[in-house]
Each structure stands twice: as C-alpha cells, then as structure tokens.
Amino acid sequence: MKQGLMILFVAFFGAACHSAQDTPKLGKAMQTSQTTAQKDTIPPGEGITETATLGGGCFWCVEAVYQELKGVLQVASGYSGGHIVNPSYREVCSGTTGHAEVAQITFDPAVVSYADILEVFFTVHDPTTLNRQGNDVGTQYRSVIYYHSPEQKTIAEAAKKAAGELWEDPVVTEIAPLGKFYKAEDYHQNYYKDNPAQPYCVYVVGPKVKKFREKFLEKLKE
C-alpha cells in the first residue's frame, strides 16, 4: 500500500505527515513507569537481553528510530496480533488479517530500560489517532504495545497513563500480550538505511528519525 501510493503522497502532501504536536515532552512523567526490575544493575555486555514488540504506524519508521537508540542490539520488522499464520505484506496491507505492522526490538536492559523504550515510542508517533499514522490508514497501522511479561504490562500501562497526561486527545494505544511474531519479508528489513532516497523515506521516515535525534541526543548510539 505504501509503495503503491508513494508518488501520490509526494505529489499531494510534499512534506512530513506529522505536525509539531507529535513531539510531546514526556521527561519526568515517564520516569514513573520505572520499576525495580528495570534499574541498571546488570553490567553491559553480560549477555542478558530483553525484547519489546511495538506498533506505531509503518514499521519502516519504527525500525529506523530504534536502530539509532543506544542499547538496542537488533530490530526486526514484522507482523503481530492477527489471525492467520505467516501472513504476507500484501495480506496484511489488505486489512483483513488483523495483524499490525510492528518492530521487534532486542535490547540490553543494562543500557536502556523498557521504560526508556516506551518513552521513545510515545514521542516519535501519535498515539491518539485510531488505526492510522498520518496518511497511512488501516488497522495494520494501529498504535500497539505487545508485552512479553507481566512486568512489561505494568510498565506499559504506566507509560500510557503518563502519555495521556501530555496529549490533548485521548491515547488509544492498545496494550495486549504478544501472540505470534512473524518476521516480514527480507526487503522490509533495514529499509530506511538501505533506501534513504525513496520518497516515503524522505518525507515520512526521515522526519521521525530527525525528531528522535533532536529529542534523545544523549541516547544516540556512538
């Protein structure tokens, strides 16, 4: 869908689809979502990792942002939350499979906490628009957090509540247990880095990455 409408998007909109309102200052409010389990008590490089699975619109955007976050070891674009096995991109884009485009993020909790991961999440996408991000419309673009543990659920609920105090409109982010994650086709992986001049990357992904860099300068990878 994104590729098919790409030229139309550039012709009619010619700019990023998100406004300045998409950059709330979460700051101290997000610190309330920290738990003892998330404190930096594990030395970096000890081999202990954690996984987050998040949907915030197009997975190219989510992947590109988290690839730049210090402590993130790997990001995979894929599909989750649907009702058919091993869906294709075309099937997911039809909106009939129930899947959301998501990024599965493997990170070192000694470097970046799950609460930090969610602070970025609620900053770089608009959690108040139901089943859409900008001009990407459909249930596959819904805002969603798929938690991997009861601890992640607790942190996600606290993060959503904190974000709700900072957005004018209600936060509609879904919080649900992770079912099955299906990795997307190979050409979707590392998409922004491999295709920086592609129109969607220029007008949609690029501004989100820029926003992340400006907001989280201290958390950028060296």
Image (spheres, helix red, strand yellow):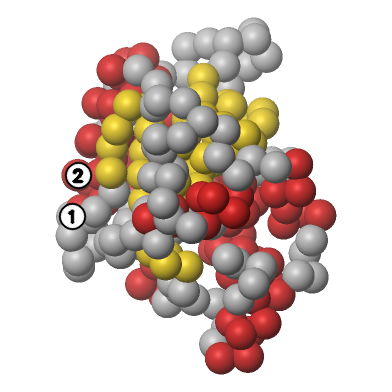
Q: Which mark is residue 165?
A: 1
Q: What element carries label 2?
A: helix
Tell me the kind of residue under disc 1: Glu
Q: What element carries label 1?
A: loop
Relative to 51, residue 140 above or below: below
Q: Give the residue drawn at x 19%, y 44%.
A: 161
Quadrant hosting residue 14: bottom right
Q: In which quarter of the image is the N terminus?
A: bottom right
Q: Residue 161 carries which label?
A: 2
Q: Is residue 26 left or right of residue 9?
A: left
Quadrant hosting residue 144: top left
Label 2: few (<14), some or many (≥20) within 10 Å? some
Tell me the kind of residue under disc 2: Lys
Relative to 193, residue 169 above or below: below
Q: In which quarter of the image is the C terminus?
A: top right
**Label 1 near label 2: C-beta < 8 Å?**
yes
Residue 65, percent from left and from top: 59, 50
Between 127 and 5, the one nearer to me in the picture: 5
Q: Is residue 120 visible?
A: no
Relative to 174, residue 198 above or below: below
Q: Give the residue drawn at x 71%, y 75%.
A: 199
Between 181 and 114, the one nearer to me in the picture: 181
